[in-house]
Amino acid sequence: MRIFLLPLSTRRTFLYAQRLHATTSPPNTSLLDRGTAFAARKWSEWEKKPSGWQKKVVEYGNHAFRRIPYEEWGLKSVPPLSTRRRQDEIEGREKVELVYPGSVLRDEDVLQVTGQLAGEREGLHRRRLMWCFVGMPITLPFALVPIIPNLPFFYLVYRAWSHWRAIAGGKHIQWLVEQKLLKPAPSSTLDKLYGQAPKLAASVSPVDKEQVLLTQEQVTSFSESLDIPALEIELERAIWQVEQAIHKADEQQQQQQQTQKHGDGTNANHDVKSKDSKEKQ
């Protein structure tokens, strides 16, 4: 397995796992993985529908999936830590590389960054997992609607599974960090893809404005150069979310500046009026 650290901006990094030598043969695949594969095939079939309620479900579903945080998608790419996988990793039968651009991330920081990305959202996922369980019984009456399946229930089931997978993936990464089983591997390929990106810690302070390091135009070159087709949609979604977050932060900052400027002007006018009033007296 390879764990990729891909900085999206000067403050955000995307963690993604590539499973090497993965097999999808029935004897070596869990029931959960088979169910996930079946759902993916069914979703793909619905996407190809020219029209109908299945097509609408896919359109609304893809719109919702686009807004699921990229951090969650990244952690879900990490397989849960099974007993067999734990033993293989401890005994060295399965190597785990930590691949990152050395021109952007400092060597001494990568393990700390990895551990932080693995554990910082665990509490959030646990809370939302519980809310999914709470909401499932409430959606059961929707099953009485004829023809159309109980979409709210299935959505909550999916979100519960998604949060669980993110928690499991994060715990796997944390365990690898604690056991010192991650092998840092700076990548010259990533260095070329990032170009002249500066060292984050050396050039960016907390007060500096956040800058995007990857653009949508680079997504295809990343997935092709790394030979990971699935990475294309993950990066596209992650970059879009980061761009939206930065744009929103800029708008809020501008509003605060305008409010402050308006407040300073009001105070200045008040001071002038007070001075004129005193002179008249």
Image (cartoon, rainbow, N blue to C red):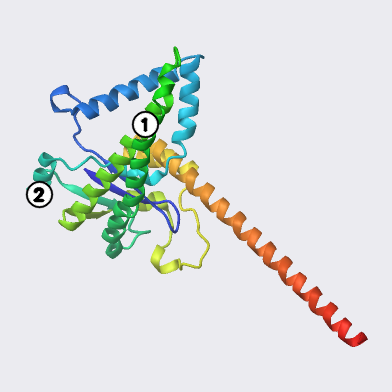
Q: Quadrant of residue 93?
A: top left
Q: Residue 65 appears at what percent x and percent y?
A: 44, 35
Compared to 267, does 74 lie above or below?
above
Q: In this view, does 131 lie to the left or right of 243?
A: left
Element type where label 2 sits in the image:
helix
Q: Is residue 213 left or right of residue 82?
A: right
Residue depicted at x 30% and y 48%: 4
How many numbered callouts?
A: 2
Q: Do the residues labelled 1 and 2 touch (CB within 8 Å)?
A: no
Q: In which quarter of the image is residue 261?
A: bottom right
Is any atom of residue 89 visible in this view?
A: yes
Q: Residue 245 appears at what percent x and percent y?
A: 52, 50
- Looking at numbered disc 1 in the image, what kind of residue is underneath it? Met
Compared to 8, does 257 lie above or below?
below
- Looking at numbered disc 2 in the image, what kind of residue is underneath it? Ile
Q: Among all residues in the image, which is located at the extreme left?
A: 91
For disc 1, the neighbor class at 10 Å (few under 14, some 14 to 19, many from 20) is some
Residue depicted at x 46% and y 49%: 214
Q: Which quarter of the rendered picture does the N terminus lie within?
A: top left
The numbered mark at residue 90 is: 2
For disc 2, the neighbor class at 10 Å (few under 14, some 14 to 19, many from 20) is some
Q: In this view, does 214 lie to the left or right of 255?
A: left
- What residue did someone put label 1 on? 136
Q: Which of 194 and 12 is in front in this view?
A: 12
Element type where label 1 sits in the image:
helix
CA separation in Å, label 1 and label 2: 39 Å
The numbered mark at residue 96 is: none
Is any atom of residue 149 visible in this view?
A: no
Q: Residue 175 appears at what percent x and percent y?
A: 19, 52
Q: Among all residues in the image, which is located at the extreme right?
A: 280
